[in-house]
């Protein structure tokens, strides 16, 4: 993850579970939140016990995705990355895994899938490669 390593300390970028994803979306939306506030935001969508949300937020903190500061008797959590930074770090991690595991075949598959999504995507890919080479 070259791009993000040079910018900031990257937390664990493995996939998140369904509840972890919902909690992160709630905190990204709010900017910062306590466990009780996240429980209220998820009410009806993912009704879970307070302790389940608390455990999930603590796990996200240990993974480096949430920072926290004491507020009275509670913790106030804030995301360490924006949702866009998370998506970029996750995509970079997946691409690296694909290329390490499959090499040339993975690269060829990536190009074929990009072409299948949209012809203009190949042009964007070409432009990104050219821009990357200019930076070297």
Image (cartoon, rainbow, N blue to C red):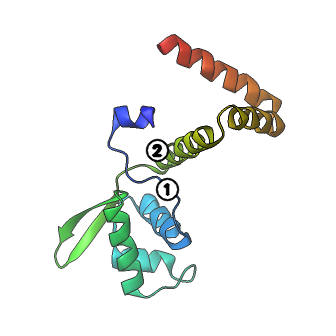
- Residue beneath label 2, please? 85
Q: Callout 2: 10 Å neighbours few (<14), some, many (20+)? A: few
Q: Nearer the viewer, residue 77 or 56?
A: 56
Quarter of the view holding residue 32: bottom left
* Above or below 31: residue 51: below
In percent of width and height, residue 56 lies at: 40, 74
Residue 101 falls left or right of residue 70: right
Quarter of the view holding residue 114: top right
In percent of width and height, residue 2 lies at: 43, 32
Tell me the residue at 80%/35% (across/down). 112
* Above or below 62: residue 45: below
Q: Quadrant of the N terminus?
A: top left
In percent of width and height, residue 62 lies at: 31, 64
- Residue beneath label 1, please? 14
SS at badge 1: loop
Tell me the residue at 61%/23% (across/down). 128
SS at badge 2: helix
Q: CA distance from mark 1 to mark 2?
A: 14 Å
Tags 1 and 2 touching, CB below 8 Å: no
Which residue ends up furthest to the top in the rendered image? Answer: 134
Tell me the residue at 80%/39% (across/down). 117
Question: Total label count?
Answer: 2
Residue 103 falls left or right of residue 136: right
Residue 112 falls left or right of residue 103: right
* Above or below 110: residue 86: below
Q: Nearer the viewer, residue 49 or 15?
A: 15
In percent of width and height, residue 77 lies at: 31, 65
């Amino acid at each position: 993850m070259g791009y993000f390593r040079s910018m900031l300390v990257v937390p664990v970028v493995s996939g998140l579970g369904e509840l972890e994803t919902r909690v992160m979306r709630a905190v990204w939306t709010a900017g910062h939140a306590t466990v009780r506030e996240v429980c209220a935001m998820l009410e009806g969508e993912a009704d879970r016990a307070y302790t389940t949300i608390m455990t999930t937020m603590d796990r996200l903190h240990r993974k480096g995705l949430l920072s926290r500061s004491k507020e009275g008797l509670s913790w106030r959590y804030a995301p360490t990355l924006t949702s866009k930074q998370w998506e970029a770090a996750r995509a970079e991690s997946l691409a690296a895994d694909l290329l390490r595991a499959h090499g040339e075949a993975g690269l060829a598959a990536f190009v074929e899938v990009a072409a299948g999504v949209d012809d203009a995507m190949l042009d964007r890919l070409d432009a990104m490669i050219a821009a990357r080479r200019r930076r070297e």
